[in-house]
Image (cartoon, rainbow, N blue to C red):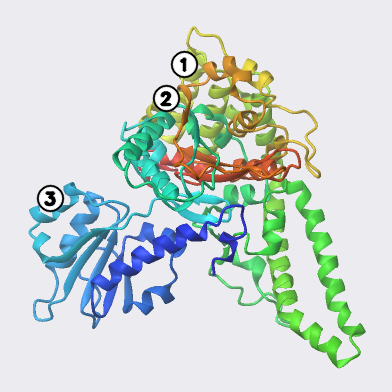
Amino acid sequence: MASHLYCGRVNLNILREAARKDLREFLDKCSGSKAIVWDEYLTGPFGLIAQYSLLKEHEVEKMFTLKGGRIPSAAVKNIVFFVRPRLELMDIIAENVASEDKLQPREFHILFVPRRSLLCEQRLKEKGVLNSFTNIDEYILDLIPYDGDLLSMESESSFRECYLENDQTSLYHAAKGLMTLQALYGTIPQIFGKGECARHVANMMLRMKREFAGSHTQILPVFDTLLLLDRNVDLLTPLATQLTYEGLIDEIFSITNGYVKLPPEKFAQKKQGEGGKDLPTEAKKLQLNSAEELYAEIRDKNFNAVGAALSKKAKIISAAFEERHNAKTVGEIKQFVSQLPHMQAARSSLANHTSIAELIKDITTSEEFFDSLTVEQEFMTGVDTDKVSTYIEDCIAQKDPLIKILRLVCMQSVCNNGLKQKVLDYYKKEILQTYGYKHILTLKNLEKVGLLKPQSTMRNNYPTIRKTLKLWMEDANEQNPNDISYVYSGYAPLSVRLTQVLARPGWRSIEEVLKMLPGPHFEERQQVPTGLHKKRQPGENRTTLVFFLGGVTYAEIAALRFLSHMEDSGTEYIIATTKLINGTSWIKSLMDNPEENLP
């Protein structure tokens, strides 16, 4: 099931297996038949660790979603709650337990993910149900393996917590996750970082290492370097529209825990003579990871290069099926038959991705998409960033989706190091009058995190940063890229450019630019136990773990994969993050009650 976790430079299946082992041990503590009551948000992340078959092996017979009232009836001995430590969830659990049938007593257990919480236990005590629980435990699920080179904490509000609420819990979880990684993959000798949150995480890691000084794991280090990057060092990249295949799938349809839901009509199998009757109404759900050969090949390409890649694949598959006519001997026929399942899977995969590409193309060829992209690229190159954009004015007048407006206004603000006060006031007035005064809190939040701000007396450093780090490349080659800027058709993500420069020639060469970006930059070294120093073979690449604190986009991941595959890069990258994000999900996380407030 997890073959895609083995295929990278680092075998991330070791991490998955460690998480599965802990889960088995907890389930075995609750002897007898069980029903799991899930905090709905956790089902996706847990699906990446363990399938239902593993739960079944440990006597899990039923699964329910956590909601008020009574738990549906089930002839089981144990009820196990899998929940995040949130007070509002404790109220629901208390209601579930209180309405339990006293004639059929069952044992209750709670598993907090990723940490136990005294506040939550106190709430259960106040509700009078704390003593009803046989086991109260925690399941430390910090970093979840998503793919052969990708780990995520899936902490949906970590950026909001760190920059808006001054709550550093997710940073503690990130440090704990990195300690778990080091226990499995050896001490990481070098740590680099940029930003306040990066500094906090590094400090916590070093403190934890001192506290467990006697328990060094005797493992040869797998990672050479850890780079911790704050999301607020590069606020621009997530606001821009991603232009890779995977990035666009996420922008348009939203990828959640490695799955995407797509409009069903494109995937209907039409039989001859049936016409278009009875089209399916349920969304088509597809899993997306590198276990699928074709997806691994095209996911990181600029969308303009995907059509040619699909066409080439179609010819190869077609030629493979034609081979059956050449199979004359029994041996040849047998060989063809043995290859058939793989060929049929390839054909089905091609059909799916052709349909997805058509759905995306319908959007990317529209005038609306082109106009929006043109304005984004003008902002990124410093055109008209200091005055009211007529395009944004028109979008507000047409009552386009609020998130689209906020992304563009924030992008203009970031590229101009803040907006002139009268421009900012004008945008705010227009947004509030068109979309409602309830959004005043959202605008305040965007100001607080630095996405939307009035221009200070300081000069705009963005043009200097853009020039020095070559953030804009004219005539980016989308078909056969030679630079990371292909992922945004011209714009090179600042976060990835910093990563690239760190590997070669090093951050000392850009000291002045680093000072212009928010937060400190630093370097730490960790002592590797004697005898465990890595002896690098000639031509062997270094391995760097890049940890994005506050979220990362699929386009940034594509850019880092591109660097890993470059012949002369000398470094391979593994990516970790608090959350996989895009501009829409990121802005949504900063809104107050986004579902209620969106027009």
- Name the mark nearer the viewer: 1 or 3: 3
From the viewer's perspective, is residue 74 above or below residue 503?
below
Residue 272 seen in the figure = no
Q: Position of residue 225 (x, y in %)?
A: 54, 38
**Residue 454 — which label?**
1
In this orientation, which residue lies closer to the viewer: 20 or 265?
20
Secondary structure beneath label 1? loop
Q: Position of residue 194 (x, y in %)?
A: 49, 27
Secondary structure beneath label 2? helix
Badge 2: residue crowd in 10 Å (few <14, some 14–19, many ≥20): some
**Residue 122 — which label?**
3
Secondary structure beneath label 3? helix
Side of 201 relative to 356 (left or right): left
First in sequence: mark 2 vs mark 3? 3
Residue, x 65% and y 18% (percent of image)? 384
In the rendered structure, which amino acid carries the disc numbered 1?
A: Pro
Residue, x 13% and y 81% (percent of image)? 104
Badge 3: residue crowd in 10 Å (few <14, some 14–19, many ≥20): some
First in sequence: mark 2 vs mark 1? 2
- Name the mark nearer the viewer: 2 or 3: 3
